[in-house]
Amino acid sequence: MNNKHHMGLRTLNRVSNTAIYILLIVISIIWLIPFIFIVLQSFRVESTYQVGYVIPHQWGWQNYINLWNSDFKRWYLNTFIIALAAAVLVTVIQLCMSYTLSRFRFKLRGPLMRFMLILGMFPGMLTMIILYRVLSDLGLTQANAVPGLILVSVASSGMGYYVSKGFFDTIPKSLDEAARVDGATRAQVLYKIILPLSKPIVIYTILTAFMGPWGDYVFARYVAMGTSAGYNVAVGMYSWLTNDQIARMYTTFCAGGVIVAVPVTILFLCLQKYYVEGVTGGAVKG
Amino acid sequence: MASVKLTKVKKIYDNKVVAVHDFDLDIHDKEFVVFVGPSGCGKSTTLRMIAGLEDISEGTVEIDGEVVNDLQPKDRGIAMVFQNYALYPHMSVYDNIAFSLRLQKVPEDVVYERVTNAAEILGITEYLMRKPRALSGGQRQRVAIGRAMVRDSKVFLMDEPLSNLDAKLRNQMRAEIILLRQKLDTTFIYVTHDQTEAMTLGDRIVIMKDGYIMQVGTPTEVFEMPENLFVAEFIGAPKMNIIKTSLVREGDKYFVTPFGAKIPVTGEKGKKLLEKDVKSKDILLGVRPEHMVLGGDGQAAIGCTLVVNEMMGSEFHLHVDTADGTRLIVRVPTLDLDAAGRSALTAGQKLNVTFEGKAMHFFDPETEKNLLV
Amino acid sequence: MKQYSDLEYLRLSKGQKFTYKLGSFFAAIPRGIGHFFANIGKYIKNGVMGVGRELGDIGSTFVHGDWKTKTSFVVMGFGNLARGQILRGLLFLLFEAVFIIYMIFGGAHWLSMLPSLGKVGPSSEYNAILDTYTTVYNDNSFKILLYGVLTIFFIIAFIYTWRVNVKQNKIAEQILKSGKKLKADKDDLRSMVDENFHATLLALPMTGILVFTVLPIVFMILVAFTNYDGSHNGYSNNLFTWVGLNNFNTMLSWTGGTGGGQSYSATFGEILAWTLIWAFLATFTNYFLGMGVAMMINKKGIHLKKVWRTILVMTIAIPQFISLLYVSKMFARNGLINLSLMDLGWIKQPLPFWEDATWARVTVVLINIWIGIPHLMLITTGILMNIPADLYESARIDGANAWQQYRKITLPYMLFITGPYLLTSFTGNMNNFNVIYLLTGGAPTNPAASGAAGSVGYTDLLITWLFKITTGADSQYYLASVVGIMVFVVVAFISLVVYNVLPSIKNEEDYQ
């Protein structure tokens, strides 16, 4: 007790803060290092495979040139189209769903939410087999995988209403009521009152919907079924890391990773504020 | 400018909880009616059913003779002020007030005229360009009232509009609502849990408890002739003293015998008891603190010990215990006591209290109903 | 188990309190399950009674209805049309027409084939024009099952719509009798953006879910009762057909099974155990470490809060397949870590990150922490900042140190708010395909369980196993769907138990 007194509160605080700073610096390094490595390796030209050092001995653009000469352009375009379409359609569908479930108290609301909860307990992967067959009957697989993937990723997106519903739940209901007394229809309440107040969650939804397809691997692979023209970046680049390709394509993979990650990361950092608000406002309450 | 009629209105929630039981009420054109009661009594639910924000489980609500059960809120010709103001945070004060007019596609110059007019009346002209979050509680309240004012509504609904304000502002706004009412000259339905607001604002007061109406009447009626124990205790502050005692009839005279004293019933009350031919019986006797007086002699005096003395400025609230430990409150105007009398009022002091025979209320201990109603 | 009253409970020692709580938690499980089945019973009873009531109502509507109503029993929407509600009437009529046409030109056929899933398989026939044998495709089990289910959906929808049609007639008659007017088409249209706006909003999302989630799930559940696989694809090689509970028997039996000699039930058990351990570790390591990082960043007196946060948040933005694949290769036998450690001479042999079962499992959990912390840091930051500061102030005045403040205020508050999140995160981790598949692909292989149902590895979760089964050489879809159903059962069981214990889930409105 006495000892502590001598040390003083301020000193104690300074010691613990220093420890925290050290820890935070270590954490930052651990979290950033793989990404710095990817960037460095994407410029390495002396070997296309994994090596035991990080700084390239020979720098160059060769890996990016390889990228340009591969199917990567097509994959990138595919993914971009899917992401764009998903960003628009998924947002519309999820907002419709979550707003309704947050604001309306209709007879089937409870059963509907329970039903979707139960539905969500089935592994979604199970539906892949049949969806693939249906898509292939519609001619939307392999080279035509893009519209097929859009259709599938959009169609069931209503199930992911939790986060935005959580956000809508935080907007006081009395605003809706006041607007309805003021003469607004339910539709007017939505676009005159609620939507202007929901900018964070709208942007959050757009952002997550847009980012989703960039990392979508399993279903995209299933639908493309080995046809390179139908790949997205994840499927295409995964194929570079298979045992027979990795020795040739490892550094090209790194270059591809940079090309994929940089725009998405910049976009994300610009909209970070809204993402954070969306996560903290909605995610937990869902 | 409309009458509102509620017939056997009932609210049953999904979980079978009945929030409002068979609510019957006729509200006349231009009347100011206050629903008052403790929280959970169903007053807000009833108001929200009138507004159309809550489904009506049974019964009908009529506005101006038209059944509005199935109408949307916007089609009922009502305006409403909410407890937490419910201002649209993304709109300026001007846009908030103009919102309903714009929805009706009123021309912008008319909108301008009406909004500035309302702002003038409420004294918020200088804040018109601000967003609600830059306003104080009182200013927000004014905006909320302004928003309701600009519509030509038949009925003006207010759901605890003052409960989020501090005491001083509340008093000020209360006076302004009275002025507003004179200006608007329309039907008002006002919900509050505060009996002072109810007494000062209402032409008629509807006192509710657990979804039932306990009494409907003018402020004077509910104060002077509470129909039951609940109303008696709810209206008036500090609340009425309730004493378990007996009513004794001796010929044509009535007495009450609290704590061994014997106090005659006089005036109107005595006559009414006689008219009703009430027999001697156990009763709950109600006496308001302001009708209790210090002193009393002989049989009328009740011996007490002072426990707490609250100096309220214009009056003292004396909390006293009788010999059997019943706590009574006595309200004594400050001017009734000289300096010596005041300084004698310290805890532990023995004193006598009594009350006048004409200021008593008699309740049946079983039914808790007023014997004289 | 002894129940304590509140006051008795307060006098228990810490250890006793804990035992008591733990005891009541487990004591509550059978009760929860009991409630569940009691509820099922109640639902069935209510259902039967409801159907009875509906039938009675339909009968009385017919008996008491006027001729317009009676006609509507056959010609849907007739009552609406005759009473001036053109829009509603036409929609009913259209629906009936579509239904009848569909049933005649397909529905009836699919439905009749459903019990057998097709009789005639593909056959080789001589083609005189081409002078060669060509394959003629006949019945298609896949389509029969799919369209059969669809037809049943359609029939249910039709019955429901027909019922609505009848009810509307009854209501219309009542309204007219009481001297009021019916809603005009104009009112119906207007209500689509007002009192029935929810129906408008839900129409599109729900259709999507119905067609692309519900229908496939029903289909796949049914597949579990067939022998649908790569060699019975129901179309170009062999038809598939109903096999009853055979597949479940296979999965649950202790004998026979995967190539390595281990039975399916043993393989399933092993994978399930690892799936649960993984989900537990993944959820709680992320949760507590994420909270720790958030608390460090939020601590008073720490500068550059935004910088620390941005560094972590940035990693969320990078698509997982890049970071996971890259890190996976980094830890590979000939990856960056092993190579540089050997260059430095710290190790002689490469570390078996992905070759040894225990190494692989630990590495997967560690890398998942790397992936998960930023997200948890964000979530917990929001909640931490919402904890009222006066709670801490009063705790400090009461003499609580930092650890006690965390234990007594922060943690209970966090657990209460994030209870539902933890549950979804747990079940989400059970099905966390990406992390496992992109990192290890399930490796290292479990020799005892390798064989028929895909090659099973030590880091395989049920979900990755399911994927391997469907994409494996034999594409045993029926087995995949059995595994899928099992996953559902496990997830549902856990959710049910937790739901009955967590206070914060039960009352949704508490949050509003």
Image (cartoon, coloured by chain):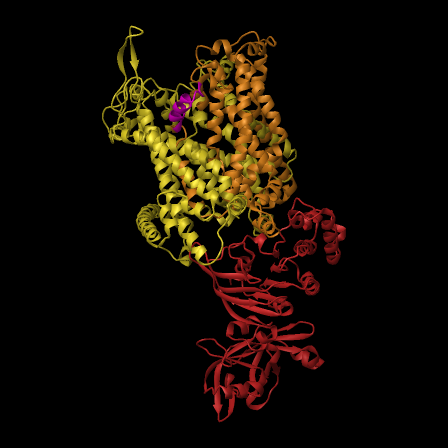
Chain colours: A orange, B red, C yellow
For residue A105: magenta?
Answer: no
Q: Residue furthest right?
A: B126
| A15, A7: nearer the viewer | A15
Q: Nearer the viewer, residue B48 or C489?
A: B48
Instruction: Say if the magenta span includes residue A128.
Output: yes
Front in this rendered view, residue B286 or C414: B286
Reply above or below: B292 against C58: below
User: Is the residue B331 above or below the residue B17 in the image?
Assistant: below
Residue B82: image location, x then y, percent: 61, 55
**Does the image show residue B342?**
yes
Is residue C114 placed above or below A244 in the rendered structure?
below
Residue A196's x, y, as percent?
62, 40
Please give left or right for residue C302 compared with residue A169 in the image. Answer: right
> Which corner quadrant of the image does residue C438 belong to?
top left
Residue B141, x across and y down, in percent = 67, 56
The quadrant of the image that shows the N terminus of chain B is bottom right
As rendered, which of B17 and B118 lies closer to the eye? Answer: B118
Magenta residues (range): A127-141
- Dominant secondary structure of the magenta stretch? helix
* Res. A37 visible in picture: no
Q: Locate residue B368, reporting x and y percent.
A: 47, 75
